[in-house]
Image: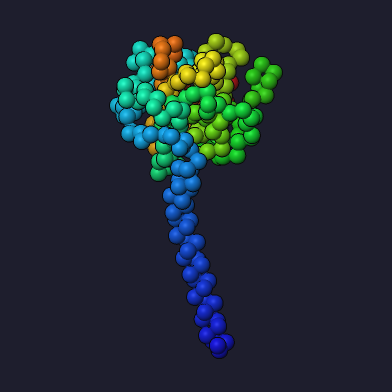
């Protein structure tokens, strides 16, 4: 092969590599979604239709925060149908695909003690949409404004570093409050975990929906629906605001300003 032919072949190989890399980069979202589709669903997970009422989501997205972390939805009664409470497949979990902006969507599960993890959670590495690092002083304790908040809490199914299960949530949304009695996601998760640990035959239907306003990257809040299947011990339908007292949040970018 002549030097000219060798040079031409090298140019062809380089050009082909660039094209392949470009195609892979352009389709990176779809490629990652295939990976997350496998990692985010139990084998027993049934086919889930999009049963979340879009009109309810829109109403929740327009709510304004007035010093109360939680608003009751539908008189605290979840919207599950009889079919959605079926336990024939045992415990399972299923996450939705992220949308075109990379934002996590509704997470569904039929919770059972069999799904609960037995090992400690490892540190999170996923960067959630809009996540920024801000620290502040809370009564002498340093806190971070944002947590990477699980939609389905780790203590319930052991699902951890999955981009479809993690949103950018304020510490007030995600973690237990130390200065007031307002509930957080962790409080509801602890209530459910306590119920599940009391018996292997206990099942809890669970759905968490992040609520976005238009094309903002950080959710305005989350709707949590919970229903114990074989008794009336747990019935929850609440909306938790993704806010932090004394902070002004830009929900499109995730940037924030401390106002005090």
82 up-or-down from 131: above or below: above
Q: Position of residue 210 (x, y in %)?
A: 43, 29
- State the residue at coordinates (52%, 73%): 13
- State the residue at coordinates (60%, 12%): 179
Q: Position of residue 92 (x, y in %)?
A: 45, 31
Camera-side residue of 150 and 86: 86
- State the residue at coordinates (36%, 15%): 77
Q: Residue furthest left?
A: 55
Q: Position of residue 24 (x, y in %)?
A: 47, 57
Q: Position of residue 8 (x, y in %)?
A: 51, 81
Camera-side residue of 224 and 234: 234
Q: Is residue 166 left or right of residue 99?
A: right
- State the residue at coordinates (52%, 16%): 199
Whether residue 146 is visible, yes or no, is no
Camera-side residue of 79 and 246: 79
**Which of the 4 image quarters holds residue 186?**
top right
255 up-or-down from 34: above or below: above
Q: Quadrant of the N terminus?
A: bottom right
């Amino acid at each position: 092969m002549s030097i000219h032919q060798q040079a031409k072949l090298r140019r062809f190989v380089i050009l082909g590599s660039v094209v392949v890399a470009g195609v892979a980069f352009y389709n990176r979202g779809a490629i990652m979604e295939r990976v997350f589709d496998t990692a985010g669903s139990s084998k027993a997970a049934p086919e889930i239709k999009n049963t979340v009422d879009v009109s309810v989501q829109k109403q929740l997205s327009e709510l304004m925060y007035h010093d109360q972390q939680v608003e009751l939805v539908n008189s605290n009664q979840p919207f599950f149908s009889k079919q959605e409470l079926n336990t024939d497949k045992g415990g399972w979990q299923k996450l939705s695909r992220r949308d075109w902006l990379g934002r996590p969507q509704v997470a569904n599960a039929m919770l059972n003690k069999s799904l609960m993890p037995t090992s400690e959670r490892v540190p999170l590495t996923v960067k959630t949409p809009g996540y920024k690092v801000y620290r502040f002083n809370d009564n002498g304790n340093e806190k971070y404004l944002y947590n990477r908040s699980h939609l389905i809490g780790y203590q319930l199914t052991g699902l951890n570093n999955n981009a479809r299960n993690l949103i950018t949530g304020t510490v007030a949304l995600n973690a237990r409050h130390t200065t007031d009695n307002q509930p957080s996601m962790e409080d509801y998760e602890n209530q459910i975990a306590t119920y599940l640990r009391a018996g292997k035959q206990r099942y809890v239907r669970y759905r968490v929906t992040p609520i976005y306003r238009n094309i903002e990257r950080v959710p305005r809040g989350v709707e949590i629906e919970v229903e114990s299947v074989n008794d009336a011990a747990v019935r929850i339908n609440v909306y938790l605001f993704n806010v932090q007292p004394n902070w002004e949040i830009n929900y499109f970018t995730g940037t924030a300003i401390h106002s005090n």
